[in-house]
Amino acid sequence: MLFGERLQQTRKEHHSTQQDVAAALNVSRQTISSWETGKSYPDIDSLIRLSDFYDMSLDTMLKEDEGMKNYLKKQEVMAEIKPTRKLTVVIDILFLVIIIFTPSVHIMKALVLLMGLLNMAVIVHISNLAKSADETDSWVRWLKVRWWWFGVAVISSFISGFSIYQQSFTNLSQNLLILTFALWFVLVAEEIRHHFTK
């Protein structure tokens, strides 16, 4: 049975009108009618209030209605995507500020660093979204990518070591050395985390 049909049937079993349900949920009667005819679906909060009003579990309410389940999944994904969209807008604004308004090299460097950090936050958020959608075990996912990261860390270490050996310790060399230490720190931390959560 579809969600709307079940909603209508349950309301009739409770001898309630659409207006009664609308008043209890603080929505319009047209909204209840739209839910019952399948033209729209309630959001999560309204769904919980419907469940309480009819004293019916969410599993029972949603049973067999793939449309409703897909709608709820989409709502969940949209809620997860919102912060990422906001961060990308902030990054774009910073980029424009850098191009248009920054006469100082130091200010430019600070803004570029801030952009990099915000971009990392976006990447982490997108990675978490991908992980939540992926049924694969986290250890298996880590095994697939860790050798790439180890390769980057080894190459970075080699270049840093070579620049120290050549005594050409420039700003670029210092930044690369910091990046190398950060990479090794993250890799060791991930290895330890996955070792104890296996």
Image (spheres, rainbow, N blue to C red):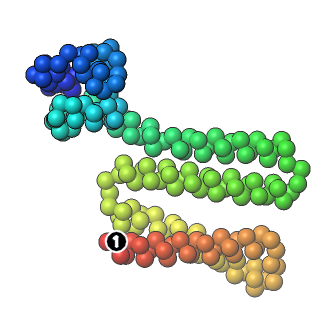
Of residues 196 and 15, the one drawn nearer to the viewer in this rendering: 15
Which residue in the structure is indicated by mark 1?
197
Q: Is residue 149 left or right of residue 108?
A: left
Q: Is residue 171 left or right of residue 145?
A: right
Image point (36%, 48%), residue name: 133
Q: Can you give x and y, in whole percent of width and height, for residue 151 in the image?
A: 55, 71
Amino acid tagged 1: Thr
Q: Quadrant of the C terminus?
A: bottom left
The correct choice, above or below, for 6 with respect to 37 in the image is: below
The correct choice, above or below, for 51 with respect to 133 in the image is: above
Of residues 137 and 157, the one drawn nearer to the viewer in this rendering: 137
Image point (80%, 71%), residue name: 171
Where, by quadrant of the figure, is residue 11 drawn? top left
Q: Can you give x and y, in whole percent of width and height, for residue 191 in the image?
A: 44, 74
Image point (33%, 36%), residue name: 44
The correct choice, above or below, for 36 with respect to 119 in the image is: above
Mark 1, residues whose alpha carbon is within 10 Å: few (<14), some, or many (≥20)?
few
Q: Can you give x and y, in whole percent of width and height, for residue 179 in the image?
A: 65, 70
Label 1 element class: helix
